[in-house]
Image (spheres, rainbow, N blue to C red):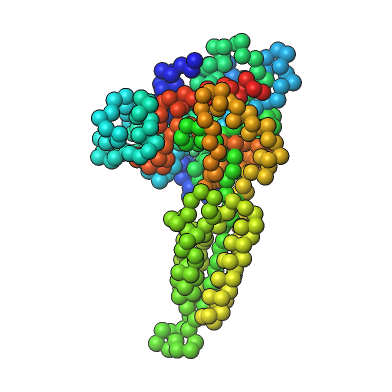
């Protein structure tokens, strides 16, 4: 059904384009954070036009937008949008990616030219299913996150163009910059979007769909001490560095990113800097429930206050909202999820709802009134040199997209 060779060619074409984003620049308000994200945006602009999309634009923030108009008589069908992101993570280089296509395996693992090993249950099952695996040469990441999503959306659009008998309402496509820096949705051109529901194609293993993510806050804890010459400090010196150290060592060890998974939340200290007079700590708070998040905020405040009291210093705590779990909004629009589950089943894929232990562009769109679940892409081991992608799983993602369109 889906043209697998075209899908593979597209994917290989996209991963070769260097689109690493830069969180420092993104934090300072630059969008896109790296100009080379435009290179992929321009390629996609051209290809969308070739696929018959209308209103195709790349705006000055590097958002690619285009739509397939509804068929005659289908104007009243609800419009639906699909999104993927252009950038790749800065954790590992994304420059000069040399993709390798693996069709034969000696074992249930892959050894990359760089010497890195890829193994694990998901790879094993993909090899047993005779799937085609794509990796980098190990010197870079692959960029399946999220070029597998882009390739799936483009291939689904290609399929719709070749099959005019599939009637549909308006279909919108957005490719966004700077998802990895967390700033993509700061600039999303909501005024262009008419869909009331959307799907990000930015997930992992086949069948995994995501309708739930963390509630996220960033806590900024600032300890204030009293600096005195160390030789004359007795009874007078209050050391903010010592307070910061004490605070950090008293955070619950069983509620850290390295000791939790599934639906468990955590405290993640991300940075500390300071002097005797003043020390600042950044801690990420993550929890799937609102009540759990409130509790975590109170725990931070209590620990900060007790620490300051113990050492005779002062402390200030500020909680900064980052993003919210999209589940409550999703529950108000169950159709969006039901369509996705049915689309998976129709493609012969067993859907499995998994919580996202992070944020997603979908959570920000959901907050903006556009419920946006996340669809698998067949990509694995994201943000690493051992990133890999299954062609057949990507193919199923494209099929799921087509089935969603049919259901609308
Ligand atoms: Zn991604």
How many labels were placed on the picture? 0
Answer above or below: position of 86 versus 43: below
Tell me residue 100's x, y (percent): 32, 28
Answer above or below: position of 208 versus 324: above
The answer to which image quadrant residue 20 occupies is top left
Residue at left offset 54%, top offset 50%: 263
Residue at left offset 53%, top offset 72%: 223
Position of 96 compared to 277: left or right? left
Residue placed most toward the observer, 225 or 212: 212
Residue at left offset 47%, top offset 23%: 395
Residue at left offset 39%, top offset 87%: 231
**Can I make out residue 56 in this image?**
no
Tell me residue 145's x, y (percent): 45, 36
Residue placed most toward the observer, 200 or 28: 200
User: In what quadrant of the picture does the C terminus appear?
Assistant: top right
Position of 105 compared to 217: left or right? left
**Can I make out residue 179 in this image?**
yes
Tell me residue 171's x, y (percent): 63, 23
Tell me residue 55's x, y (percent): 63, 22
Position of 132 compared to 156: left or right? left
Answer above or below: position of 332 versus 296: above
The answer to which image quadrant residue 76 occupies is top right
Residue placed most toward the observer, 75 or 338: 338
């Amino acid at each position: 059904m889906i043209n697998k060779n075209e899908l593979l060619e597209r994917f290989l074409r996209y991963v070769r384009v260097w689109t690493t984003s830069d969180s420092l620049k993104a934090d300072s308000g630059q969008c896109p954070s790296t100009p080379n994200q435009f290179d992929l945006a321009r390629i996609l602009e051209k290809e969308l036009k070739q696929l018959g999309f209308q209103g195709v634009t790349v705006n000055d923030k590097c958002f690619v937008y285009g739509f397939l108009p509804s068929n005659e008589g289908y104007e009243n069908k609800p419009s639906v949008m699909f999104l993927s992101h252009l950038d790749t993570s800065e954790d590992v280089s994304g420059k000069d990616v040399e993709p390798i296509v693996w069709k034969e395996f000696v074992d249930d693992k892959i050894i990359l030219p760089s010497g890195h090993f890829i193994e694990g249950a998901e790879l094993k099952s993909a090899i047993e299913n005779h799937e085609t695996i794509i990796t980098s040469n190990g010197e870079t990441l692959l960029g399946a996150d999220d070029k597998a999503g882009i390739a799936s959306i483009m291939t689904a659009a290609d399929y719709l163009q070749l099959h005019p008998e599939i009637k549909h309402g308006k279909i919108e496509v957005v490719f966004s910059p700077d998802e990895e820096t967390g700033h993509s949705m700061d600039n999303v051109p909501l005024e262009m979007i008419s869909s009331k529901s959307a799907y990000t194609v930015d997930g992992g293993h086949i069948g995994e769909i995501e309708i739930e993510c963390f509630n996220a806050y960033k806590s900024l804890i600032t300890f204030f001490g009293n600096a005195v010459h160390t030789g004359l400090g007795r009874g007078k010196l209050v050391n903010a560095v010592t307070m910061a150290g004490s605070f950090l060592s008293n955070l619950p060890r069983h509620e850290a990113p390295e000791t939790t998974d599934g639906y468990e939340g955590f405290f993640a200290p991300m940075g500390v800097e300071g002097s005797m007079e003043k020390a600042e700590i950044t801690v990420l708070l993550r929890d799937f429930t609102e009540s759990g998040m409130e509790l975590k905020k109170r725990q931070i405040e209590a620990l900060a206050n007790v620490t300051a009291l113990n050492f005779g210093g002062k402390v200030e705590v500020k909680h900064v909202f980052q993003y919210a779990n999209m589940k409550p909004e999703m529950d108000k629009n169950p159709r969006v999820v039901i369509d996705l589950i049915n689309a998976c089943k129709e493609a012969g894929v067993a859907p499995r709802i998994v919580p996202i232990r992070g944020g997603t562009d979908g959570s920000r769109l959901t907050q903006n009134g556009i419920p946006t679940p996340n669809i698998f892409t067949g990509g694995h081991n994201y943000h690493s040199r051992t990133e890999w992608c299954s062609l057949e799983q990507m193919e199923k993602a494209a099929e799921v997209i087509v089935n969603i369109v049919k259901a609308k």
